[in-house]
Each structure stands twice: as structure tokens, then as C-alpha cells.
Image (cartoon, rainbow, N blue to C red):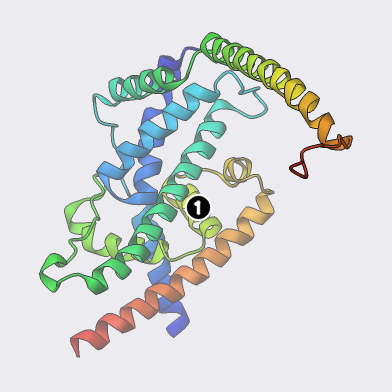
Amino acid sequence: MKENSSNKDMNTTMEALSHIKRVESPEGLYDKILLTIQKKQEEIIPLYRVRSAAAILLFALSIEFYAASKTEKRTSETSIGTLVYLPSNMIYND
Amino acid sequence: MTFQQVYNEHKNLVYNLALQYLQNIEDAEEIVQDVFVTVHEKMAQFKEQSQLKTWVYRITINKCLDYIKGKRAKKRWGIFTSLSADREENPIQVSDFNHPGIELEQKEALEHIFKCINQLVTHQKTAIILLKIEGLSQVETAEIMNLSPKAVESLFQRAKTNLKNLLHHNMKENERKFV
């Protein structure tokens, strides 16, 4: 008997749910959607700007490497002297 | 089909489905906007593997479920911040229940029913919403949920059983409060 009444309650519940009305969506949402889409498109960085920035960065890096390699050559020439022993005659003050 | 045509054809579907999940006008409006922004972004990728309506249903359901998850996470965090805050800063929370498709006489009863539906697991909640509230067939529901019609039937039966238990449990809780 209890089960019958709980089944009846369940049927009433299901019926109540199926009677929920469908409503019209509010006006003005479409304009808000278009605005959001427009904002998103403005946030996207154009590809040509990305390419230009990458090219400038590569150019700056290559100049940096070139300059660094030049200074490295000079320092490596002076350091050869440390590898080869050059006797000094100034040890004792004669 | 242009984006505006897609919007006009599906706006009520999306709005009403969002209301069934969230039971709140403002939240449903937000979902409608999110759904159609996504539709706009992904329209080119839609390769008609399913019907457009099915695709829109799926996006709406996913957006609603993500929104609910986000709200629950905020609530959990809110508990920690409220522990340190002064009592006066935390007034009594007014119910968010604001479904325009429900008549005033039915509001209290359906608020209670939806409170229990919201406690069901995701798939069971979706099955009840699509089959009973949206009035879709088992085949249509199966296509949206990517399940077989038999699986949908079994899911719906489990959902009904769980909902019955929740309603019964909540009724007992309310009786205890008034005693």
C-alpha cells in the first residue's frame, strides 16, 4: 500500500515536471552575443603582427650572437698566453 | 544557414533548457550568450556528423553543467571566507529559484522537486530533464547523450528511483523541522 502511494506521488511529480511551460527567450540577447563575439575578435592579435615581432626578435638575437662571437675571439687570443708559459725576468730585482 | 538563422531557430530551445538546469532567469541568459558565442566559433568545424539541433543541445548541456560546477566551487570557497568574516557581512541567502515557466501555485512544490533533481548525478539529471521536461523521445535523448535508447531507459529508471528516495528523505527532514 505504501509503495502504491509512493508510486502515485512519483507520477504526480513527473506530471508536474511535464507541465512546465516553455517561455520565449528575452529580447536583446542577440545584440549582447554579437558584442561578445566582436570583443573576442578584437582580442585576437593579427598574424602579421606576430610574424613581424618574431622577425625583429630573430634579427636582434642574430646581432647579439654576432657581437658576442666577435668579443669571444678577442678574449680567446689573450687567453692563449695563459696556456703557454712565458718566463718573466722580473722575479728578482737585480 | 547564417548565424542569425541558427540563433532564431534555436534561441528558445537553449533558453528553456538552461532554465531547466539552472531555474534562474539571469543564469539562463548568461548560458544562452555563452552557447551562441561557442556556436559562432565552431560553426565552421561543424561537419554535420549529427543534426544541428542535437549539436546545440549538447553545447547547452555542457555549458550548464560547467556553470553549475563553477557555482559549487565558488560556494565551497565562500564557506572558508565566511568563517573569518563578521556575521553581519553574511546575510541570509535568498533562494535563486526564478523559473518563468512555472505557475505561482506550483512554485513551492516544483522548487522542492528541482532541489532534489539538482542532487542527482549529472547523467540522471540530464535524462529526467530531456525526457520529462523537454519531452524528447528516448531515441532523441540517446542521440544527444551519445547512449543507446536502452541505456537511456535504464538511466531514467535509476533517476526516478533516486529522485523518489530524495523526495521522501527531504519530506521527512521538513516534517522533523516542524515538529
- Front in this rendered view, residue A3 or B38: B38
Q: Chain of mark 1?
A: B
- Which residue is pictured at 43% across the width and 46% down the height? B64
User: Could you say which is closer to the camera, residue A44 or residue B134?
Assistant: A44
Q: Residue at x 51, y 63 (%)?
A: B121
Residue behind mark 1? B126
Check the image and report above or below for B62 versus A80.
Answer: below
Question: From where the camera sits, is residue A1 visible?
Answer: no
> B171 left or right of A77?
left
Name the residue at 34% across, 77% down. B170
Q: How many marks?
A: 1
x%, y% of residue B66?
46, 48
Query: Relative to A14, does residue B161 appear above or below in the rendering?
Result: below
- Asked which quadrant contains residue B167, the reply is bottom left
Q: Of residues A58 and A18, which is closer to you in this image?
A: A58
- Image: B54 above or below B27: above
Determine whether, in the image, residue A29 is placed left or right of residue B64: left
The amino acid type, in three-letter code, at marker 1 is Thr
Instruction: Tell me, yes or no, if residue A41 can be seen here.
Output: yes
* Residue B156 x %, y %: 56, 59
